[in-house]
Image: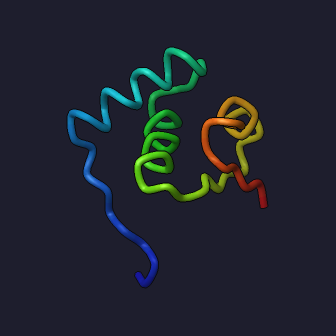
Amino acid sequence: MPGIQIVPVDAELGEMAANLAAHLRLRGADAIYVAVALRHEVPLVTFDTQLAERSFGIVEVIVP
């Protein structure tokens, strides 16, 4: 699909996600989404209001 990139979860990304999960009280998959947004300097687009609230200030968050 155009505009879609598969991002492998390497050890560094996993560690970043684990730290985010602990500090922001995120679920595992949600922490991965935030870590990917941080690493690739892209906004996090989510309908999950809890994820948006907890990620605010860490990454740019867009709630459609």
Determine whether 23 is above or below 49 in the image. above
Which quadrant does the N terminus fall into? bottom left
Horizontal placement of 1 versus 53: left or right? Answer: left
Horizontal placement of 40 versus 52: left or right? Answer: left
Determine whether 23 is above or below 9 in the image. above
State the residue lying farthest toward the left. Answer: 11
The colour scheme is rainbow
Q: Quadrant of residue 42?
A: bottom right
Question: Residue 54 appears at what percent x and percent y?
Answer: 69, 29
Query: Residue drawn at (39%, 23%), measured in percent from left and top?
Result: 18
Query: Residue drawn at (21%, 33%), measured in percent from left and top?
Result: 11
Question: Residue 32 appears at what percent x and percent y?
Answer: 43, 39
Which quadrant does the C terminus fall into? bottom right
Determine whether 40 is above or below 35 in the image. below
| Residue nearest the viewer, comparing 59 with 64 | 59
Query: How many labels were placed on the picture?
Result: 0
Question: Residue 51 appears at what percent x and percent y?
Answer: 67, 36
Q: Quadrant of residue 52?
A: top right
Horizontal placement of 21 versus 64: left or right? Answer: left
State the residue lying farthest toward the bottom. Answer: 2
Query: Residue drawn at (53%, 26%), measured in percent from left and top?
Result: 27
Query: Residue drawn at (50%, 50%), measured in percent from left and top?
Result: 37
Horizontal placement of 19 versus 14: left or right? Answer: right
